[in-house]
Amino acid sequence: MVSTARSYEITLQLFCTYLTDARYQWGRVCSERFGTAPHQVFHEWNSLTHIADYEGDPRRRPLDYDEVQALFDTADGRVEQIRARRVKGALLAKAGCDGAPRRGNDHLPGELYAGC
């Protein structure tokens, strides 16, 4: 995957940056011991370009803001449909919409009487 390659590239680039930073004097040490100094090998012209916000499988991309809003609007609409029919299930549907999992009698104080 491109994201994995970019991760490896960034790790190596940061390591090379550390080696070539004058504050750590690795250039001097390497020149004395090996006869050559390290240098940065990753540059803008030979690095992977970041062209998309999400580089994984497009079928598994995260939802964007509008899609999340549509999902929550649909869930809220489902609660309203159940309430309008005056059948059981509105409280359970609402509990599922607010992000807090509920089981059986697990409810907030006053929730049963809130007209949900």
Image (cartoon, rainbow, N blue to C red):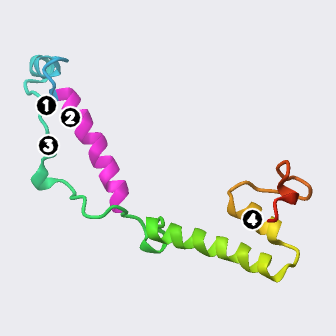
Cα separation, mark 2 vs mark 3, equals 7 Å
Secondary structure beneath dot 2 equals: helix
Q: Mark 4 — residue?
A: 94
Between residues 96 and 17, which one lies in front from this camera angle?
Answer: 96
Other residues around mark 1 within 10 Å, as few (<14) / some (14–19) / many (≥20) = some
Q: Residue at x 82, y 50 (%)?
A: 108
Magenta-tinted stretch: 1-19
Cα separation, mark 4 vs mark 1, equals 61 Å
Marks 4 and 2: CB-CB under 8 Å?
no
Of callouts 3 and 4, the N-terminal one: 3
Quadrant where the image shows the N terminus: bottom left
Marks 3 and 1: CB-CB under 8 Å?
no
Cα separation, mark 3 vs mark 4, equals 56 Å
Q: Mark 2 — residue?
A: 16
Other residues around mark 4 within 10 Å, as few (<14) / some (14–19) / many (≥20) = many
Residue 65 lies left or right of residue 108; in this view the side is: left
Q: Residue 11 lies in magenta, yes or no? A: yes
Residue 16 lies left or right of residue 44; in this view the side is: right
Secondary structure beneath dot 3 equals: loop
Can you give x and y, in whole percent of width and height, for residue 61 in the image?
A: 45, 67
Of callouts 2 and 3, the N-terminal one: 2
Marks 2 and 3: CB-CB under 8 Å?
yes
Q: Mark 1 — residue?
A: 38
Cα separation, mark 4 vs mark 2, equals 54 Å
Q: Which mark is residue 41?
A: 3
Q: Residue at x 22, y 57 (%)?
A: 48
Kind of residue at badge 2: Cys
Instruction: Tell me, yes or no, if residue 42 can be seen here.
Output: yes
Kind of residue at badge 1: Pro
Can you give x and y, in whole percent of width and height, for residue 3 in the image?
A: 35, 57
Kind of residue at badge 3: Val
